[in-house]
Image (spheres, rainbow, N blue to C red):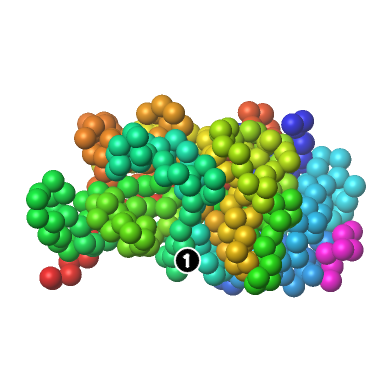
Amino acid sequence: MPSLRSWFNIPRGSHFSLANIPFGIISTATCNSPRVAVAIGDHALDLEAFAAQNGFSALSTVQPHQAVFSEPSLNAFAALGPPIHSVVRKYIQSVFAEDTPYPDVLKNNPALQKQALFPLKDVQKHLPFRIGDYTDFFVGLNHAYNCGVMFRGAANALNPNYKYLPVGYHGRASSIVPSGTPIRRPHGQFLPNPAADEKVPVYTQIKKLDYELELGAFVCKPNKMGEPVPIGEAQNNLFGLVMLNDWSARDVQSWEYIPLGPFNAKNFGSSISTWVVLMDALEPFKVKGIENDKEVLSYLEEKDDKTVYDIQLKVDLKTKSGSTTTVAKSNGRHLLWSFPQCLAHHTSTGCNLQTGDLLGSGTISGTSAEEYGCLLEATEGGKKPFKVGDEERTFLQDGDEVTFTGVCGTDEEALVGFGQVTGRIEPALNLGY
């Protein structure tokens, strides 16, 4: 991708280059009302203030809809559809371009710069969407196989349906939180000794707390109940992607998941990055995913063989004492099914998705231990500890802080990144029972 030069100072290596323009929700010290913004370099452009001072004066298609930028979520803007998202993004790119055709909008307008541009370090970032429903898929083949081996053995690692449909389950939207929100260690019911003959559980604070390296896709276009979304149209129902940490209680999970799958092991907290990268911005980074050796049914068959994204993903773990290590590097290409396929399958029964619904990819792991997207895989269920400075870990301890970063591209002046999603583990409550 050619570099996009700007009159505005965008630090080299920024995730939020002119090639990106991700959307989010911010508030500031001068105005605590959450509203829509975009990230540009190490600043946020407040689109409410920008619109109020005729920033969109040269974009007639958006002028009737400018009220969406004053909303406390991206739902109203997202509902306008991908053509509007694309037009707004390209217009903002042109406003910030070095040779902007609209110099009087912002480049030569110091008053508006002062009103609408805020350093990212000075803004409060909020959940980007009002999330009605959350569905977590399980489409990282390497992760699914590795976990299947641990739970069922190599011969039955993947269930017979795995390569014919995107496996998923309905998660919990109420406990999705923005990056930086602490995660409290939960209590749960699990077996203190899974090898014991008599299976008698306990209820106490969980021991095997884990992270899961995922991507999440937000729905922008709803479909009517009873009307599936054709695979050829599914991409148009997606707004953009975020990074997702779907925290997991592995001891609870192994006890509860039969027969209905994840429940309390996955509902106590999920963290997402706060800037949503539009599908348009990700388009240049489309690549082939994991090849499916089964014949996909026609309702899931995509025409383009490039269906996933070359997103470089990294997991850093920082202990309470301050020791930090990179514990995994993976990539968004390690998926068997794409988000359009997930959406098409989700709606194939006529299930009606809504604007702001979130679809998770499931854990994204590569084929080597350095690419495993969770500690369950990396430590083989807790059997192989690893070093973080002078400390050892098998699962997360209180005070540990997990940070995911994700970025597309290698041109330091044209990176398309997600920033980061971070969460620190707080001790469990003392329940007294």
The residue lying toward the viewer, choosing from 28 and 329, is: 329
Q: Quadrant of residue 236?
A: bottom right
Image: magenta residue range: 57-64
- In magenta stretch: residue 61: yes
Q: Position of residue 335 (x, y in %)?
A: 54, 39
Q: Position of residue 180 (x, y in %)?
A: 43, 55
The structure residue drawn at horizontal position 32% and vertical position 56%, both measured from the top left corner, is 257
**In this rendering, position of residue 269 left or right of residue 124:** left
Does 168 appear above or below 431? Answer: above
**Residue 105 shows in the view:** yes
Residue extending farthest left: 197
Q: Position of residue 197 (x, y in %)?
A: 9, 50
Does 371 appear above or below 16? Answer: above
Does 395 appear above or below 52? Answer: above
Kindly identify which residue carries mark 1. 173
**In this rendering, position of residue 154 left or right of residue 277:** left
Does 178 appear above or below 96? Answer: below
Q: Tell me the kind of residue under disc 1.
A: Ala
**In this rendering, position of residue 397 left or right of residue 13:** left
Considering the image in quadrants, where does the N terminus appear? top right
